[in-house]
Amino acid sequence: MANQNAKGFKRLVNACFFSIAGFKATWEHEEAFRQEVMLFLVSTPLAIWLGETAIEKLLLIGSVILVLLVELLNSAVEAVVDRVGFEHHELSGRAKDIGSAAVMLSLIWAAITWALILL
């Protein structure tokens, strides 16, 4: 395990490895994340092709990246809730529901962004 008290460049290198581990864990354990990565892989070339300006391309791609970011955070919340315990608890359910709502909102935002730019 990398030294969590590292400084300077070593800290930056460690942070990159921790981030890669986070991507791998999310890819392995979260089907929704895999689906959203596939969406990103399909939509990015489309955005480059269909966007007329650099800003349009950035907004189209950025809206899908936002979905990935929110899904990563939602997966982190779910992992922490599951770590605490699998028994039903109102606050655990609420935390998971709120994370899911955030993902849904980001998907709606992406859809609206694509619709407004392309239609």
Image (tube, rainbow, N blue to C red):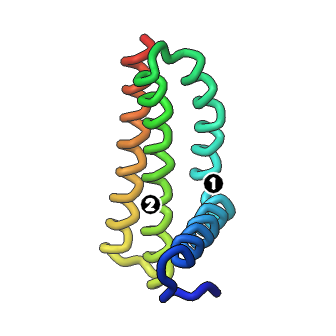
- Looking at the image, which residue is at 43% across and 52% down? 70
Task: Judge whether 22 appears above or below 59 on screen.
Answer: below
Pinpoint residue 19: horizontal percent, then vertical percent: 56, 66
Pinpoint residue 12: horizontal percent, then vertical percent: 53, 71
Q: Which residue is mark 1?
A: 31
Pinpoint residue 119: horizontal percent, then vertical percent: 42, 11
Q: Nearer the viewer, residue 96 or 33?
A: 33
Say which amino acid is labelled 1: Glu
Say which amino acid is labelled 2: Asn
Say which quarter of the image contains residue 36: top right
Task: Please give left or right for residue 24 compared with residue 114 in the image.
Answer: right
- Looking at the image, which residue is at 58% across and 52% down? 33
- Looking at the image, which residue is at 55% across and 24% down? 47
Task: Judge whether 15 appears above or below 103 on screen.
Answer: below
Quadrant of the drawing holding the N terminus: bottom right
Task: Judge whether 80 appears above or below 117 on screen.
Answer: below
Is residue 71 visible in the rendered structure shown here?
yes
Q: CA distance from mark 1 to mark 2?
A: 13 Å
Q: Which mark is residue 74?
A: 2
- Looking at the image, which residue is at 60% across and 37% down? 39
